[in-house]
Amino acid sequence: MKVIVSRSGGMAGIRLTWEVRVEEQPDPATWADFLNSLPWDDVTDSEATPDRFAYRIRCAPHEVVLAEPQVNGPWRDLVNRVKAANGM
């Protein structure tokens, strides 16, 4: 299973992407449980805000696009975990 987090927008409009293969992590079962607990179906579309970041999070079969203010709680935890797994 692969998790891809892309951040785009901001003042410069630069896109950054971080990727994790769950089966290659030291704790794949913990990752899988965490991913299954995310509120994938509860995300509502939001308007893009100028000069703010937007996050696209993909983990098949799920995909969400979150405005920067929506990246909180479990979504912030996921972004931080994926970035940490990439040495960020």
Image (cartoon, rainbow, N blue to C red):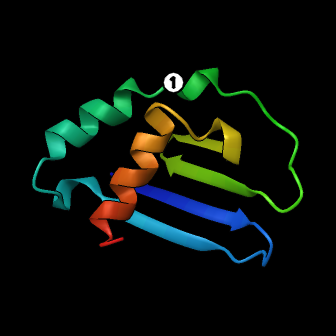
Q: Position of residue 45 (x, y in %)?
A: 79, 33
* Lateral position of residue 18 relative to residue 26, left or right: right
Q: Position of residue 27 (x, y in %)?
A: 12, 47
Q: Nearer the viewer, residue 70 or 37?
A: 70
Q: Nearer the viewer, residue 20 or 74?
A: 74
Q: Position of residue 9 (x, y in %)?
A: 76, 66
Type of the residue with mark 1: Pro
Q: Nearer the viewer, residue 61 or 24?
A: 24
Q: Residue at x 36, y 36 (%)?
A: 35
* Lateral position of residue 78 relative to residue 54, left or right: left
Q: Residue most toward the top?
A: 42
* Lateral position of residue 44 relative to residue 25, left or right: right
The residue tagged 1 is 39
Indicate the quadrant containing the C terminus: top left, top right, bottom left or bottom right. Answer: bottom left
Q: Position of residue 79 (x, y in %)?
A: 45, 51
Examine the rendering and report whether any part of residue 16 can be seen: yes
Q: Residue at x 89, y 58 (%)?
A: 50
Q: Which quadrant of the view contains residue 41?
A: top right
